[in-house]
Amino acid sequence: EALRRSISRSTALLPLKESVERLREIKEPCELSAIRKAIAITLDAFRFVEKSLKPGISELACVAEIERFIRLRGASGSAFNIIVASGPNASYPHARASSKKLKEGEAVVIDMGVEWGSYKSDLTRTFFLGKISAPVRRAHGAVREAQERAIAAIQPGIAVKKIDALARNTIKEKGFGKYFGHALGHGVGLEVHESPAINGKNANTLEPGMVFTVEPGIYKPGEFGIRLEEMILVTDSGVEVLSGNDRDQSA
């Protein structure tokens, strides 16, 4: 605005769409170090909160426990409003934690991230409380397979939209296609949502140094939701799952 006031009215200012954003797609070693630290704290928080996931505790109480834990571990705060959504609440991808209490037989989606050194993390786990119905179990298997197929295909030079299509088609093949309505993922760095957008419209190719999420989901309105989210790094030879190989612990 200061620049606009200082120039003549005959001069126009034009936004440089996706100029700075594209420059931030490739993470430098110091950036990766901060992101790895944020991820490590988030994974510790998942292991911590899993122990307290019992029928009778409220979603908001879970959020409070997580926020306290990540602060004590050195995070400057949560990267966004932490999602704890149980049962039918989990059928909303951007559900807000409520006073609802967890119940036996429910799936509980926890989506959280922390900020460390100005950099963010963003991970999601789905936990089960007791015995889960067959449809929920099948949905979980479909989401897991979609995620694994997408991650396995990641390498430099492949079009972003092909990664999205792999996951989306897998879920469709399992009969849940209409219940996966959002993009497969997004870049993470100084912001929790930044370039590259991992969706079916992005024809750009992956490059070494890109960091983004892979988060397929199935959301059956009013019944249940399943989401699994990892953060990955595109390497010179393929892919590194920055959030590790413990993804089956929430199954």
Image (cartoon, rainbow, N blue to C red):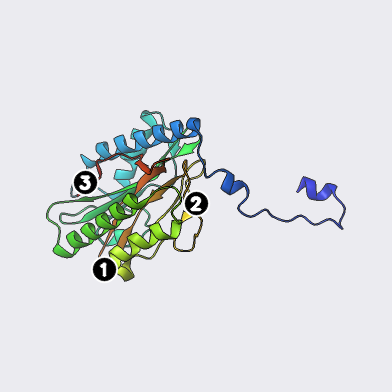
Residue drawn at point x = 25 percent, y = 52 percent? 108
The numbered disc on residue 173 is 1
The numbered disc on residue 196 is 2
Mark 3–mark 2 Cα distance, whole angstroms, equals 27 Å
| Mark 1 vs 3, N-terminal side | 1
| Mark 1 vs 2, N-terminal side | 1
Q: Name the residue that disc number 3 marks.
A: 248
Q: Amino acid at mark 3?
A: Asp
Nearer the observer: mark 3 or 2; the answer is: 2
| Mark 3 vs 2, N-terminal side | 2
Mark 3 residue crowding within 10 angstroms, few (<14) / some (14–19) / many (20+): few
Q: Amino acid at mark 1?
A: Glu
* Count of residue discs: 3
Q: Amino acid at mark 2?
A: Pro
Q: Is residue 88 left or right of residue 165?
A: left
Q: How far across and down, in percent of the image, does residue 149 sit?
A: 30, 55
The relative height of residue 20 versus residue 28 in the rendered view (above or below) is: below
Local SS, label 1: helix
Mark 1–mark 3 Cα distance, whole angstroms, equals 22 Å
